[in-house]
Image (spheres, grey):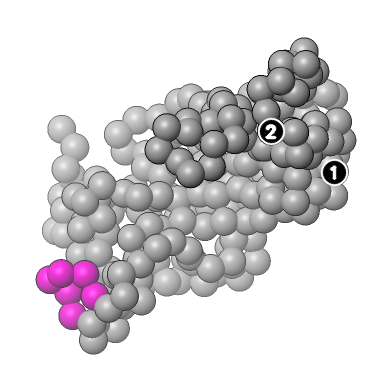
Amino acid sequence: MADTVITKDTLRFLNELKINNNREWFEQNKSEFKSLETGVKGFYNSLMDKMKEHDEIEKLKMFRIYRDVRFSKDKTPYKSHFAGSFSRAGAKLRGGYYLQIRPGGSFMAAGFWEPNKEDLLRIRKELELDATALRELINKPSFKNTWGELVGDEVKTAPKGFSKDDPNIDLIRKKAFIFVRNFTDKEVLNKDFMVEVNKSFKEIRPYFNLMSEILTTNLNGESLLN
């Protein structure tokens, strides 16, 4: 059971870490952190097993609690959250999953965060040609009820080489193509939280399928893969 739920102690510890974000406090409480971390990793691994029932997941990456402060104005040494990302397997399967556990700020995300310039141009060219399939997919009631609106940074007017009067400019100006779902602490602590996260990730698959097809073919629909 411990590997299928997020515990109250986990959120309590993260709250305390946020208040006492210094090395002395952390070292004094490191044994509890290690114990809680083991449980959280177990949760993420159990979630990955469920995700493998509806997608090909290559690996799970758990992010370290230690912050890189070299280029940050914020010099607090630790993150006050747990987070992990799930990578899809194979060159044909594009897109990524992310889950963060933070008291008062837990969320899951899926999509294409900061795609490289080649991928971004390919997506934009496809949308310039025809965005009907994408619009129909992301406006489907079951999808929209789960994931809401497409989010991500965007240019102010139009990317170079594209018209600001293009009927699909609202999509073309995006620099990232991601969806985010937020959770309350009560939802995170619910015994069915993993089930809900997995169900939401499953709901994003048609979006990944469409975007993967775009990113692995040219505008003529010919494969770019060897």
Drawn side of residue 61 relative to residue 217, left or right: right
Q: Amino acid at mark 1?
A: Asn
Find residue 140 and report its image quarter.
bottom right
Q: Which callout, 1 or 2, points to the residue nearer the camera?
A: 2
Task: Please tell me whether residue 40 is drawn above or below residue 146 in the rendered image.
Answer: above
Drawn side of residue 117 relative to residue 193, left or right: left
Q: Quadrant of the C terminus?
A: top left
Q: Nearer the viewer, residue 222 or 84?
A: 84
Q: Residue furthest bottom?
A: 165
Q: Nearer the viewer, residue 149 or 199?
A: 149
Q: Amino acid at mark 2?
A: Asn
The secondary structure making up most of the magenta span is loop
Residue range of the region highlighted in magenta in the rendering: 158-163
Q: Position of residue 39 (x, y in %)?
A: 75, 22
Whether the magenta-drawn stretch holds residue 171 is answered as: no
Which residue has dot 1 on it?
A: 190
